[in-house]
Image (cartoon, rainbow, N blue to C red):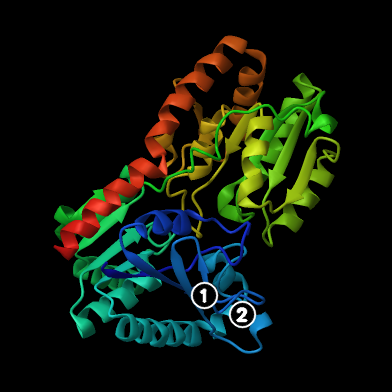
Amino acid sequence: MKNVLVLASTFPRWKNDSTPSFVFQLSNLLAEKYKVIVLAPHHFNAAKKEKIGNLSIQRFRYFFPEKYQKIAYGAGVIPNVKESFLAKMQIPGFLASQIKSAKDIVEKEKIELIHAHWLIPQGVIGVLLKKIYRLPLIVTIHGSDLFPLKSIFFKKIQKNAARNADVITVNSKTAEQELISRFPEVKSNVRVIPMGIDAKIFKPKNVKNKFKKYKNNKIILFVGRLNEQKGVQYLIKAIQSAVLEIKNAKLLVIGEGDYRKYLEKLANELELNGSVEFLGAKPYSDLADYYNLADVFVLPSVTSKIGVEGLGLVLVEAMSCGACVIGSSSGGIKDVIKDGVNGLIFQEKNSEELASKIIKVLKDSKLRKKLRENGLRHAQNYSWEIISKKFLKIYEYLLK
């Protein structure tokens, strides 16, 4: 069994964590055929070393006291660094600790392949390891490591990582186009492979008994990190218009981030306290119940300094549970939603258009049936069983 090192900046900190788990899900399946060691940032109260499923996990500390480690988790690396002076100060330690830990693992575990999730900084570290130890390198781009980083400085770093990768995967055609427009020379090494979903968890089921408090409501749902780029502010403004036509409409917001305070203030100013409910972060295992509760799921992402939506995997999770979905025109969302077929698209930042589409879906039963059925079929293309096989082929190619 050959040994693989996975580098990541977003990874579950513990069992049933609310942190996105796509790197874990993919790596755990690949670990059925390879010995996979994951290196991720440490978080206060998380284990330094542990085994979960098929994976050996190591977390590197980059600041003391540990409870003041600010770069990873929460709203995400870029928002954290942007908003926190302390996070900015921790960047050198973050990089140095990750490099040292990665080198130790490569040498101790006799690693034969590096898989770096995110072009920056993991892709850069992957290139360093590749050159020192003469190892093949796959870099997976998720969007936040590409779209918002447009300065000459970051483009030079991205170019170095992209040109030195043996294979680059991107999660959407939009990301592929952006990458190739910047660095045409890497075109032949690029593969479009989205992250997947667990079809055993995300499936239609009856949750009425669990959510009796909402039995008289039409539920609009959002799931994601609460930062400016997710565009929840425009969804809240849309709800102000929607409730004028549909009195029992209620927006449920699942997620955490520093932006939550602003969003709660906005809902209060618009006198929507009875129509908007903030539920905080929820464990990954609980999300399927909320998707099944939702009449409409909305991803209102916008183009901002933080970036654009790389794909919008939550849309696929919602589709797989039978929810009707509405997404903005931002980034890779159009890779998931075919407007009018398996969901609806609205122009990003346009709250009035979003409100009209929410109302349309809630009032038109024939449209709901059409979107639901087509969404269920489309979501099947994103099962981890299908996605992991595509990555396995790349691993086999690089390790032959």
Q: Earlier in the sequence, mark 2 or mark 1?
A: 1
Based on the displayed image, in which of its 4 quarters is residue 396 positioned? bottom left
Secondary structure beneath label 2: loop
Q: Is residue 371 above or below residue 198?
A: above
**Residue 148 seen in render:** yes
Residue 85 % position (x, y) = 61, 80
- Mark 1 — residue? 41
**Which residue is at the far top?**
366
Q: Is residue 22 above or below residue 138?
A: above
Residue name at image x 18 percent, y 79 percent? 134
Q: Which label was assigned to residue 69?
A: 2
Q: Residues within 10 Å of mark 1 (few under 14, many from 20)?
A: many
Residue 248 % position (x, y) = 81, 24
Relative to 50, is 140 on the left or the right? left
Residue 297 % position (x, y) = 61, 33
**Residue 143 seen in render:** no
Relative to 350, is 121 on the left or the right? left
Name the amino acid type tagged 2: Gln
Name the amino acid type tagged 1: Pro
Foreground mark, 2 or 1? 1
Residue 105 % position (x, y) = 37, 82
Based on the displayed image, in which of its 4 quarters is residue 66 positioned? bottom right
Residue name at image x 22 percent, y 67 percent? 165
Relative to 119, is 214 on the left or the right? right
Q: Give yes or no for contact between labels 2 and 1 (Cβ–Cβ under 8 Å).
A: yes
Q: CA distance from mark 2 to mark 1?
A: 9 Å
Count how many numbered circles sit on residues in the image: 2
Based on the displayed image, in which of its 4 quarters is residue 374 positioned? top left
